Image (cartoon, helix red, strand yellow):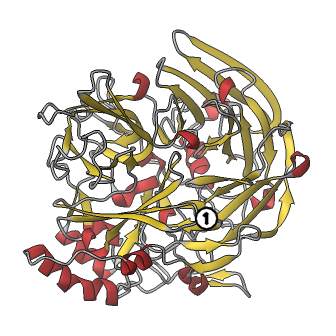
Amino acid sequence: MELTKSLKTTISPKFSSPLPLPSVHRVWSPPTKTLQTISVSTSVTNHVTTTTKNDNINHPTPQNDDAVAAFWDYQFLFISQRSETAEPVALHVINGAVPADFPAGTYYLAGPGIFSDDHGSTVHPLDGHGYLRAFAFGENNVVKFMARYVKTEAQEEEHQSGTDMWRFTYRGPFSVLRGGRKFGNSKVMKNVANTSVLMWGGRLMCLWEGGDPYEIESGTLKTVGKVDVINGCDSSLEGVSEGGDVWDLAARLLKPILYGVFKMPPKRLLSHYKLDAQRNRLLTVSCKAEDMLLPRSNFTFYEFDSNFKLLHKQEFTIPDHLMIHDWAFTDTYYIIFANRIKLDVAGAMIAVSGISPMITALSVNPSKNTTPIYLLPRFPNKNEDGLLLRRDWRVPVEAPSQLWLLHVGNAYQHLEENENNLNIQIHASACSYKWFNFHKLFGYDWRSGKLDPSIMNVNAGQNDMLPLPHLIQVSITLDTKGNSNEKCEVETLNQWNKSADFPVINPSFSGYKNTCVYAAASSGSRPALPHFPFDTVAKLNVSNKSVRTWSVGHRRFIGEPIFVPKGVEEDDGYLLVVEYAVSVQRCYLVILDPKRIGEADALVARLEVPKHLNFPLGFHGFWASAK
């Protein structure tokens, strides 16, 4: 399906703040009314069930749901939280009950914790210091909550623990400082460890897109320190010698500046990793620092066993300027979608001066109407059914649509019955190049330091494709006989056109055929915020093409859902998702029954986080089983 038709877009009117933004400690408490939770199933016919919960939640009339309320709701989703709790706090169950068969383990959620300092600077959400949240499920169905900042080098420099005062000194890639140093400030690589979290080989780690992970004590959330995962692997294995072309020369000239002046690591580990469920392996990938500025991209893939021993390493160089946030894998391939970028020379000069964020040195490159997809062989020296040796990985498969890949839910491959074709299926979220803008993500305005919700709520015309994040299915067919009969198709997943992101599956099926995809989505019920923030958990069955949803109700938002397995069936388990009741500044941990999504009894339990520990929107989470 073509995703790049000419967009006749309309943008919601700019949200202007009627009042100065509140301080990080001020909490607005509107009148309380009832909450409606809505569960919807859409397969052949729509089934809508509404249940009413008396939960002290503001539910204004449609007349009051205007741009002012939407503006404030959006701001409160990103309000700073300075408090930490090193001692576990038992959460109060306000709806339902924690199931007796809920697996023992901990749900970890990474994300930023603070956005404004005490000297006038406000940073982009992606530059906010990492604030790790933990929900531990233990004996007697008690859930205990902890939250602590990741003590990165930048956090310890910018935070005075004795006075609890903050002064931002690192620029970060996405922000501009007001109270700190601008011109000549080379502190760009602000490793805030705020993007994702992983438990592997008995080690808990918080990851960021541009630096080494930080290890955390699982029981106390105390920061252990930075972990050199990839550079140690590179030094222990034979590397690839540098060539002599013009880009190798440019790379050698850039390295002293990037490594010495801007303190960039030689290789940056991507925050998104993969778990190969069948092989019980952790898969990670890194890029070189100079790839940000040169029209070529170097990817190194690493595979670790359950004890964090390196088993496999592969390096690839792609002759294109790419920015990769997430990626996919199958039993025999690593899969890279070519999110194409270019260097903006004028923007780079302004960014280096400190007037604009460093990320303004880059812009998307929509010069191609297709999307190159690179199928990189995981095991090039193994002839598995003769499928790998006949294809040159340097030649990408061209998807017929121009799309910017955001997140991958899953990918898998299967051999068709005639054994002449290998079919690869990828379930992911993507958006349009026309909408994606590095320095406006989350609506951040670096000039004012405020968040503009209208940037995240572009409306396309009735006959246009979705520009904002939505779920897609990519189908690739390869000819196993060596012929050039390749085919690639892109379509909206289950023909469902709601704004959505953060696709996840039962992790036991990672890299292999799955039936169910879960995602955070927008119900579209709020005119002022039709697309983001999300308020709905969606369950998409890719076999029967059904879509079932559960919504939190009015003036409440959600983040990424997480699947907790408890049996052998794919949807046998529970879904965890955090609910952000912005109108009363409360957070809730919600437990859903995946089998009942779309029905009135999908909600299993809702647990309340103490008000003084209310936290901002999280990014990515991880379920660590006690087993």
Q: How many marks?
A: 1
Residue 239: x and y in percent read: 28, 76
Q: Amino acid at mark 1?
A: Gly
Left or right of 417 on screen, residue 165:
right
**Observer-nearest of 215 and 152:** 215
**Observer-nearest of 99 and 561:** 99
Residue 51: x and y in percent read: 76, 23
**Could you tell me which residue is drawn at 86 percent across and 37 percent down?**
97
In the rendered image, is residue 118 in sight?
Answer: no
**Could you tell me which residue is drawn at 85 percent across and 60 percent down?**
89
**Could you tell me which residue is drawn at 66 percent across and 43 percent down?**
577
In the rendered image, is residue 623 in sight?
Answer: yes
Residue 282: x and y in percent read: 50, 58
- Residue 417: image quadrant is top left
**Could you tell me which residue is drawn at 29 percent across and 81 percent down?**
353
Q: Is residue 455 above or below residue 25?
A: above
Neighbour tally class for label 1: few under 14, some 14-19, many 20 plus, Cα within 10 Å: few
